[in-house]
Amino acid sequence: MKRLFLILIIISSPIFSFANDYHLFVGPSNNFADPIGIIRLGINDWELGRLKTGVYGFAKMFYFDSKTYYTEFGLGYSGKEGYLFSAIGAEWRFFSFLGLRGELYAVAGTLGYFQGLATVGLAAHF
Amino acid sequence: MHLIKQVLPLILLFLSFKVLASVEAGFGVTSATSGRLVPAVSAAVTWSDKWALTGFSTGVSTNAYYQSTYGLSFFRTWKAGEIIGIDVQSGFGLGTFFSKREFKNLSSGSAAEQKTDFGVGPALRMNLSFFKNFYLNMEATYGLRELGAHFTFNFQDMVSASLGFRL
């Protein structure tokens, strides 16, 4: 049992390591209709959650430099149609664990619903 | 002598050991005909893996109306990384689009109303390359119009997605 426990720790350590960056990004939708229209939980370069109001999925972030500027690409689903998701943005950290993040993002739906929007929200790092 | 001067640069271009430019051609859909899957043709010229000039054209025509929309964008591009082995190229630049619509009076056949739209603003591009010469491309132009609308995160947006091949 002790050996099994040690193996589980070793296997899970790369996922739950302190070296990993866990973050939560929360931003409003356009017109502030939904103050938390965007909720994305991130582990390192990957994000999962509500990409935009009504669209859920995952995306990968590509950083330019020291994790300030990034682009992002992902896939989403709204319950009716699938979406391609793209974004470009920047995050300015005013504390080591908290930053202001703004991005231009766009979705392209398989049934023809396309939209390009922006958001400015808060990103918390754990 | 004059002919040699003109032809020599072309010969040198073909003798280049490094390919400096590529041409993309594809089909897709855009937000110009929002909610409907109206085909669009797209094309791009990229060079040095740093710059891209892209464009698209789409339109629809019925007995009641027609619409034509054209887009042209210029991007600074860079190799962003990979997703499950697929190369991803990102771009940021300036985009423009122009749209013309005309509604017809069905009883008389004459033009009842004509509208044009023009937009210019920042643009983003994501390009995923797969099977060597094929790509999936997504572009968005955020047309600037009213400052108040932008403060509420709204833009005169034009989004396009296309599948194509690279020469």
Image: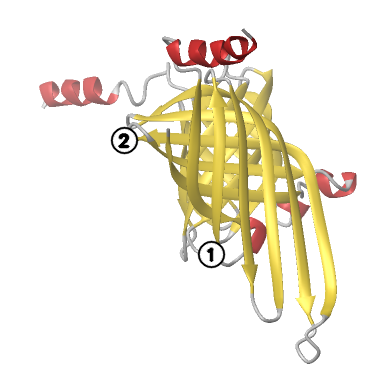
Under mark 2, the amino acid is Phe
| Circle 1: residue type | Leu
Find numbered disc 1 in the image and state the secondary structure of the residue it sits on. loop
Residue sitting at x 55%, y 41%: B43
Q: Which residue is mark 1?
A: B37
Q: Nearer the viewer, residue B126 or B113?
A: B113
Q: Is residue A113 visible?
A: yes
Left or right of A2? Residue A57 is right
Which residue is more in the foreground, A102 or B102?
B102
Instruction: Please determine whether, in this image, residue A88 is positioned above or below residue B38.
Output: above
User: For the point 55% across and 46% down, which residue is it?
Assistant: B42
Where is residue B66 shown, x and y percent of the image?
Answer: 70, 70
Marks 1/2 same chain: yes
Q: Is residue B127 above or below residue B113?
A: above
Q: Quadrant of the N terminus of chain A?
A: top left
User: As drawn, is A35 to the left or to the right of B15?
Assistant: right
Which of the marked residues, 1 or 2, is nearer the chain's N terminus? 1
Seen at 50% across and 64% down, the residue is: A111
Taking the image as shown, residue A39 lies to the left or right of residue A8, namely right
Residue at point 48% right, 46% down?
B26
Q: Which residue is mark 2?
A: B131
- Residue A8 in the image: state x and y as whole percent: 20, 26
Can residue A103 be seen by looking at this rendering?
no
Residue B92: name its quadrant: top right
Residue extending furthest toward the bottom? B107
Residue neighbourhood size for the residue with mark 2, other residues' Cα within 10 Å, grouped as few (<14), some (14–19), many (≥20):
few
Residue A119, image quadrant: top right
Q: Secondary structure at mark 2?
A: loop
Residue A9: give x, y in percent of width and height.
24, 23
List x then y, in percent, for residue B107.
Answer: 78, 92
Q: Please, is residue B85 above or below residue B160 in the view?
A: above
Looking at the image, the residue that sits furthest to the top is: B1
